[in-house]
Image (spheres, rainbow, N blue to C red):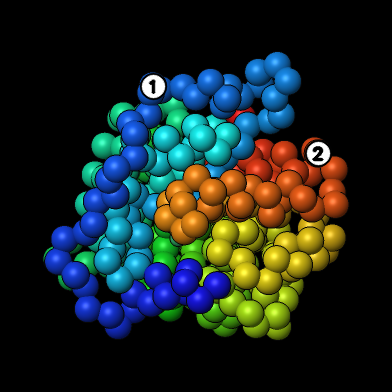
Amino acid sequence: MASTISRREFVGTVATSGAIIAAGNPPASGQSAPQAQAGGRGRAKAVIDSHVHLKHGDAARTEFPARVIVDIMNQAGIDKSIVFAMCTTTQRSIEMAERAVAEYPDRLIPYAYALPHYERPVIKELESALAGRLFRGIKIHAGECTLPEYIIDPVLKLAGRFHVPCLIDAAGNQAAAKRLAQAFPENTIIFAHMGAYGTKNAKLVDAFIQLAEDHRGVRLDLSGVALEAKIGEAVRRLGAGKLIWGTDGPYAHPNLVTFARDELEKVRRLPISQAEKDDILGGNIARLVHAAG
Ligand SMILES: [Zn+2]
């Protein structure tokens, strides 16, 4: 996944001024997708993409408007998406998500982004977002925010108080991930990409599967997983209940819709029951964020 790895090389890259706004996609025709009526006849359980960027962590800090995200969802058959921004302040991430969800309240579910700031009371900003009940989780990225206790533990404590999950990209930092899992046994922690984006390091992925096996509150996000066979292995070891599907999109290669469909297929072609697929593709995250499936 060389092309997808390169989009992640944001740490240490020079930020371009101004993000690219994705354009050229037709606007979504309306609030509800005809093929995405959860619970409708002839249709399986709701599909929820648990990992969608309003603003990415790529070198260009690419932004995607809500209408583009919803248009992809309509075409790929995704009922709801959890959306968040990174590479920006916590306050701006909250504003971006609020704006997106105001446009599509039935389709998008917002997470706030936790990033320390020398001048701003980030915990207070996160707290007020969660207290408003619109925000259903917190995104944390070890590429921008390191994970020692004096930085990140207040965020986990806050998430625990509001009973919302933290989606943490630990960037392969097993020790930090383990410490968090041990220090916050009551929290729900979803480790992105089964440990590290696009990793080919089977031992690293195994360590994160083990972490999920050892800790009740740990879940694994299936986006950006290069070692696809590890997804099937994780289902066998952990059961479907600990795995959370997401695309880490939008992503324009080969194109926005095909990328999302391909990510769906990774779960749909697993040799597991339909009920297990339903849980991985939406049921599990719906329970965690209290979204109607
Ligand atoms: Zn991501």
The Cα–Cα distance between marks 1 and 2, rounded to whole angstroms, is 29 Å
- Above or below, 279 against 148 in this view is above
Q: What is the quadrant of residue 196 in the picture?
A: bottom right
Q: Are marks 1 and 2 in contact (CB under 8 Å)?
A: no
The residue identified by callout 1 is 30
Which image quadrant: the C terminus?
Answer: top right
Which numbered disc, 1 or 2, marks the residue that appears first in the sequence?
1
- 146 vs 34, left or right, is left
- 23 vs 219, left or right, is left
Mark 1 or mark 2, whichever is nearer to me: 1
Q: In the image, what residue occupies the spot 80% across and 65% down? A: 233
The residue identified by callout 2 is 274
Q: Amino acid at mark 2?
A: Gln
Q: What is the quadrant of residue 17 in the picture?
A: bottom left
Q: Amino acid at mark 1?
A: Gly
Helix, strand or loop at disc 1?
Answer: loop
Residue 183: horizontal and vertical position, in percent?
A: 56, 69
Residue 198: horizontal and vertical position, in percent?
A: 56, 72
Q: In the image, what residue occupies the spot 74% across and 72% down? A: 210
Q: In the image, what residue occupies the spot 72% across and 39% down? A: 278
Out of 62 and 218, give the one closest to the viewer: 62
Which image quadrant: the N terminus?
Answer: bottom right
Out of 190 and 83, give the one closest to the viewer: 83
